[in-house]
Amino acid sequence: MSQLKQVAASEGLRGVQLDYRQTNKNNPFFAFLERIGWKTERTVGDNNEETVMIPLERIADCPSYVEVYFELPYEKQRSSDSSQPFSGVDRAGKQTKVVLLTVSDSAQTIAKEDLLGNTECWDPEIHWIPANEVREHDRHLAYLTAISFSHVDRLLELTVYDTSASQALSSRQPFEAPATKTEQRLSELWTELLGSESPSVNDHFFEIGGNSLKAASLVSKIHQAFGVELSISDLFAQSSLSAMAKHIDASDTSGFEAISLSEARKYYPVLSAQKRLFLLHELRGELDEYNMPGVILVEGHADIEQVEAALQVIVNRHESLRTSFAWVDGEIVQKIHPDSKLKLEVFDHALDNQIDRLIRDFVRPFRLSEPPLLRAGFIRTVSGKQIVLIDMHHIISDGVSLGNLIHDFARAYRGEIMPPLRVQFKDYVVWQQERLQSDAMEEHRQFWLDSFSSPVPKLNMPVQENRSAALNEGAVLAFRGDRELRRRLTEYASEKGATLFMVLLSAYYVLLSRYSGQEDIVIGTPVAGRIRPELEPLIGMFVNTLALRSLPAKDKSFDEYVTEIKELTLNALRHQEYPFEMLVQELDIQLQPGQNPLFNTMFAMQNMDPFLYEFADAVLSVYPFDFGKSRFDFTLQARELDEELDFTIEYKTTLFSQEAMERLSTHYIRILEQAANNPETLLQDIRVLGDEERAVIAERMRANRSPEFAEFDF
């Protein structure tokens, strides 16, 4: 910024203007500016968009405070050209190009002359922060991107654009503001759903952050806002803002069925998914396999009484947290309690090496007959670390609910008065029971029964032990696809009129087909199940599972197969309301111990960024923790992070070794790379094994040992 000040001043500019939108990912930058004294002038517009300018007089000529984040010491390249970037190692072990600060291997000293051309006043206070103490949001490579010029005279050679007079160059078409009332209202819905800036009428929903799951939510929002009932396929066919608005205007209106408040009762019915969890709880005893824990890191000052009071506000706000379950007249029912006291469990003066054990011990079985089915804890170590622990039972919660709870906790901790919820979870349950008798639900039911009209295939993966162990002991393996791979796959998806989710899922089917030798495979994928906008802020078990059955035949090209997966996904989302548990009951599937119905593997695309909440004296962020559980044999999760593809495999350690999962991850990336290079490749021609692996397997087969894969011709 000090160098940019000199550039701006040389051009006669008054300040440095920033394009900014309030998001959890952008807010840390402004917290940093405030901390170092660079005050900004903000003008807030519609949709939380801000015009932000830092006047030149408020930017220091020389920095006086620097925080240095590092994984391994940065080593200066041996080059006489000072404009060359330095080489560093990121957390994935790959080489990166950055020009933040340099550190020698022998001592942590700043190579000041390489950072600025003029070092007369360069004497900052340096704050070294080791990698293991860096919050997750600070590790994002986006925050480490630096201008690759280390001398002011080089910066002065850059072309300067006055942002007040012209827009920055972009690959998107020139911005054209929404003009019609429909375009303007639809623009608001896009912005609300995608958390992005106001879109142009030329923008395409799936090119600026939309995906198939968000499309399902947009369908509901459009129905509520315009009284027009579109399908997800309509959104793919008319994906630009302009085309979508015209399609809405040309469509017939229909009534929007809002969820009404149910009458007061002593007991309320339960969802089929809740019924299954209650029965499992009774059959298997009080186990913690369906707990949903979360861990929050609190940096700064944390008031324990304020933490407990904020959590109590959440319990009072959400009836689901004051719910118990029991048998009444032969039926499983839920009861809403008017009040329920939450007691914060405090672990004070703990040692840092005790944190993992305290977190694991905190997660323990619930008694479903005793509310609240939520517990909370607080760890404070002698070194000053502060951690908030959350644990809920899945019968009253899901993944989105955990995010909602943390969001409400941050608001309550800040002292906000939250408006009352329009409906509660019990209202949704009563409403859904009525819908189960509708003609629309019968159509959904028939779709899924047709999908599984033939015998359900069992996925035959090579495992290391007998699954009769029926244990959910698990582990997590993380791996990444680089930026270039993500870019090519995203572009390919856009050209296909598909989503990245569909392309990644297609590759996953190919992978499983190669491992199992099967061409009829079922993969589960979760959907939020919040099919009405008023359900989005609630805590409850809304999540549903889609059992996607596909035929990855060898003679299909990858491109043809993606088209099939697109249609499969859209049809499944169109019929997502039918409860998975009811489908399993209709199919009358007999399960063996340790098996899940219909499928043993899941695929999920995560859409939520790691949360971050800042207060005057504290910052709340996610505290990553592996709880060592896996409900399915293995689950592949994908997300877009730092312009790369971030993957995790959660797997049962009784079935798979870490080495086996590492090989599987390598094979998956290899499939994605070949698909990106040539989508017309036949599935049978995609090579999964490397030359070295092929040689090892050939030797195993010559020695009459069992091969690791059903097929050798990879």
Image: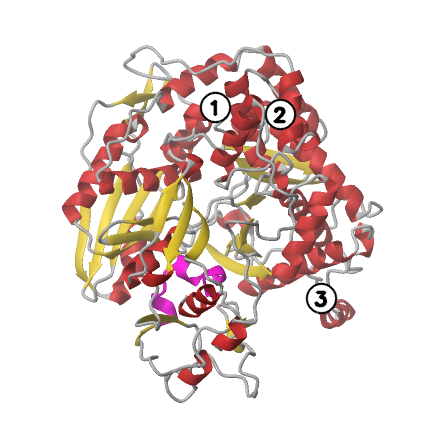
Q: Residues within 10 Å of mark 1 (few under 14, many from 20)?
A: some
**Is residue 134 a member of the stretch shown in magenta?**
yes
Residue lying at 30% horizontally and 57% vertically, measured from the top left: 34
**Is residue 465 a member of the stretch shown in magenta?**
no
Q: Could you tell me how far apart the alpha carbons at marks 2 and 3 are, in whole angstroms?
A: 62 Å
Label 2 element class: helix
Q: Which residue is mark 2?
A: 245
Residue 521 lies, in percent from the top left, at 69, 41
Label 1 element class: loop
The first of marks 2 and 1 along the sequence is: 2
Answer whether residue 125 is visible to the viewer in this image.
yes
Q: Is residue 261 above or below residue 477?
A: above
Front residue (pair 54, 454): 54
The first of marks 2 and 3 along the sequence is: 2
Taken as a whole, is the magenta stretch helix, strand or loop?
helix
Residue 356 lies, in percent from the top left, at 31, 60
Q: Which residue is mark 3?
A: 705
Residue 474 lies, in percent from the top left, at 47, 54
Q: Is residue 405 left or right of residue 634?
A: left
Q: Amino acid at mark 1?
A: Arg
Residue 486 lies, in percent from the top left, at 63, 55
Q: Nearer the viewer, mark 2 or mark 3?
A: 2
Q: Nearer the viewer, mark 3 or mark 1?
A: 1
